[in-house]
Structures are given as C-alpha cells and as structure tokens.
Image (tube, grey):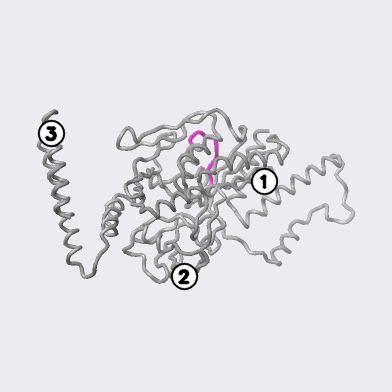
Amino acid sequence: MKKILLGTLAGAVAGLVIAVQVSAPINAQESTRLQTTYEQLDLFGDIFERIRSTYVEEVDDVALIEAAINGMLTSLDPHSSYLPPKDYDEMQVETRGEFGGLGIEVTQEDGFVKVVSPIDDTPAYRAGIEAGDFVTHIDGESVLGLTLDDAVELMRGAVGEEIVLTIFRVGTDEPFDVTIVRDIIKLTAVKVRTEGRAIVVRITSFTEKTYSNLVEGVAEEIEANGGVDNIDGFVLDLRNNPGGLLSQAIAVSDAFLDAGEIVSTRGRNERDSDRFNAQLGDLADGKPIVILINGGSASASEIVAGALQDHRRAIVIGTKSFGKGSVQTIMPIAGSGAMRLTTARYYTPSGRSIQALGITPDILVEQRPRVEDDESTEEQERRRSRSEADLRGSLNNDSLTDEEIELLEAERAEQEEIAALRDEDFQLSYGLDILRGLNVLAK
C-alpha cells in the first residue's frame, strides 16, 4: 500500500513540476504546505499498513478506509459524514417520503445522540420520545464513542423488531428506558384541516412532495369552507419538523410571499453561494398567517419561519427553534457511495444567520402539559358557565333577530372549540386566538 501511495504522490509531484514550468513559481509558503500534506499522507499510508499487518485481528481493508474517511468528515462538524452505498440508497428513499425505522431525526451532542424531533404518527412519537431527549444507550449498549452514523445503524433493523432506547431528559432525575417497535415510516408531509375559521397547515417534513401536498391540501380546504373570504387566516405548524430539502423550503416560503428574498446561502467559494427570491402569487391571498415553532423545528423549517418573519408576513409564536443554519451538499463519489459535506451557511432575508441561535419567536409561548379529563373539573366549569339565560323566567333579548342570535351563538361555539384546545394544545390555541384578533382589527 505504501509503495502504491508513494507512486501516486510521485505522479502528483511530477505534475506539479510540469505546472511550474508553464506558470509562476510556487511561493515558499505554499511549497511548505504541500510538503507537509505529502508527509501526512505518507504517514496515513504507513499507519494503514501497520494496522493491516500487526493488529490483533484481521481487518477489513474497505471498512478501515471508510472509517478513516468518515472520521475525517465528522471531525469537521456534526452534519458532514461519509455515506456508504447502502446508507446513500436509504437516504434517497427517505427524501421520497417512505422508509423503515423509528421515526426520529437525530444529531450528536457531547458524545450522545440528541433527538432533534420525533416525526408525527411514528413509533418514536407514539412512544413519547420528545425533542431535546438524549439517547444514552441502544439496547443496553452505550453510544459514547460511536459516530452518529454508527448509532443510527444500531437503531435500524427489521420492521416489527423491538428496540430499547435509554433516554435522559432534561428535568428528570434518572435516565429511563423506552421500548419501541420498528415500523415502516410513511411520511405525510402536509396535513390540512380547519379549526374555527382558520386553516391549520401541519407540515411534518420537507420531502419531494411537500409543496405539491401543500397546494393541493390548502385548495381543497378553502373550497370546503366556501372560499377564502370565509377564512380568518392560516396557521403553519412547523413544530418538531426536522427539515429536509432546501428546494422545498424555498417553494413553501414562496407560496406565501409575492416578492423579495427568501433565503441566501454563502459558502467559502462564490460557486457555493446563492440567493433565492419569491415569485408573484400568495396561496393565502393576503390573509394573516401565524407560524408555530419549537425546539424541534430545524433547518428547512427555520428557513420558512425566518423568511415569513423577516417580511412581516407572519407572526411567529412558540419557543426558540433548533438553530441548524448550515447547508449540506450530497456529493456522489466512486463506489456508489456519497459524501455529505457542509458547504454553506444560510441567511434569512434580513441577513441573519440562525446557526446555533435559531429563530426567536415574536411571541414566546411555552406548551402547557396536557390536562386529563376530570369529572369534578367539568362540573365546576359547568357551574361557572351558568348565566342570566339559564334562570327560569328570564327576559328575552329584544335587540337581535332570531337569525342574528343564531349567528352569535355559532361564533361563540367556534370560540369555545378553540378555547377547549388550550388543554390539549396551548400553542395552537394561542395562534388561533392571534388570528381571530388580527381579523377583528382588520374589520
């Protein structure tokens, strides 16, 4: 191996000598740098050969080289890595919206695997895994010392098999075990529904189908409501959305903007920098927008929230987002594998990088714990809701027609439905209240 490596380097040196003959001389500093690089490559070849010949067990040459490549990439940042052919194929399947696994997006922090967010309606989500959880052990094996890709590989397995994750959650005294059954993960990128007079758009991930699902779902919901004039506004729920394709984040942002910059990417080289602008056309027809984010909102989610926030097109509420403001480029390489390399940072229209800082909501709203149903609580609420109209023999209201009274009661029913959400999803209920207030002011 050493002889082969030296032969390769000799060829490289010969090429440099030829280049020197037809161009300006290489300065001393550059020459020293190249010499140091060659010495380090020679050192790598020497170590590789010694491992092959003297390690206590026979090693797989390919696996050893792949580990060296991955070590080089992971030393750069948590998001750069080597993708062997199998992992590269799986990644391509995931961006199309269907794959096998647990349903969590993870990163690495302080040697442990950190959950960026669980994906809606997946085994991990149903098992109670939360954004910010740390995975300390997988089936009893510590993750310390493992690369992120190694840890992810341990979490993969056959559909139907059980896996036990040991979780440490900030605010708890001791780690605890969570048993999850692996399943096929089918991502429904966008779910659209109506709450009161608002259309709620839940975006769970940015896959190849996100934008088309968004347009189709919103159009159907507007039609079901009898037109956009019957809508107070839109809620974009980006909570626990770990991100995905940059192109889809740009398309979703553009769907609600008529003009202006959406996001810019800036790399070390000019060719790695770009700027993306919105085209005419607003899917929401100018209606108010509220965006929900939390600590599980990352990457592409932060691009959308940052773009609409900077253009004052939406009010962002919730808690600070994850803060992943870097762009990874997937570069296919020899052998059917690929390299995931961080090539740029992205910036919101105002020029702010959210790397490590995240998106700060316009209105900070913590999510309240869910309140379980309780008969005594319901009875207390029923007593509090009694009014003059409940008294026997009370006078009728003579200032409104029967039709106006029916309309008023319908509006109150909508308000009560939204208020009932506060025990189940306080952040969403808060967002709907904001939309209602904006609509009242507009009128």
**Would you call the spot at circle 1 few (<14 residues within 10 Å), some (14-19), or many (20 or more)?**
some
Name the residue tied to disc 3.
18
First reached walking from the N terminus: tag 2 or tag 3:
3
Q: Is residue 170 visible?
A: no
Q: Is residue 295 visible?
A: yes
Q: Which residues are magenta?
A: 310-317
The kind of residue on which mark 1 rests is: Thr
Q: Nearer the viewer, mark 2 or mark 3?
A: 3
- The residues bearing labels 2 and 3 have C-alpha atoms spaced at a distance of 63 Å
First reached walking from the N terminus: tag 3 or tag 1:
3
- The residues bearing labels 2 and 1 have C-alpha atoms spaced at a distance of 37 Å
Does the magenta run of residues contain 313?
yes
The kind of residue on which mark 2 rests is: Asp
Q: How many marks?
A: 3
Q: Quadrant of the C terminus?
A: top right
Q: Residue visible at 69% across and 42% down?
A: 197
| Left or right: 378, with 91 as reference point | right
Q: Secondary structure at mark 2?
A: strand
Q: Residue visible at 79% across and 54% down?
A: 387
Name the residue tied to disc 1.
194
**Would you call the spot at circle 3 few (<14 residues within 10 Å), some (14-19), or many (20 or more)?**
few
Q: Nearer the viewer, mark 3 or mark 1?
A: 3
Name the residue tied to disc 2.
177
Q: Which of the 4 image quadrants contains residue 60? A: bottom left
| Left or right: 296, with 136 as reference point | right
Q: Residue visible at 16% across and 51% down?
A: 4
The kind of residue on which mark 3 rests is: Ile
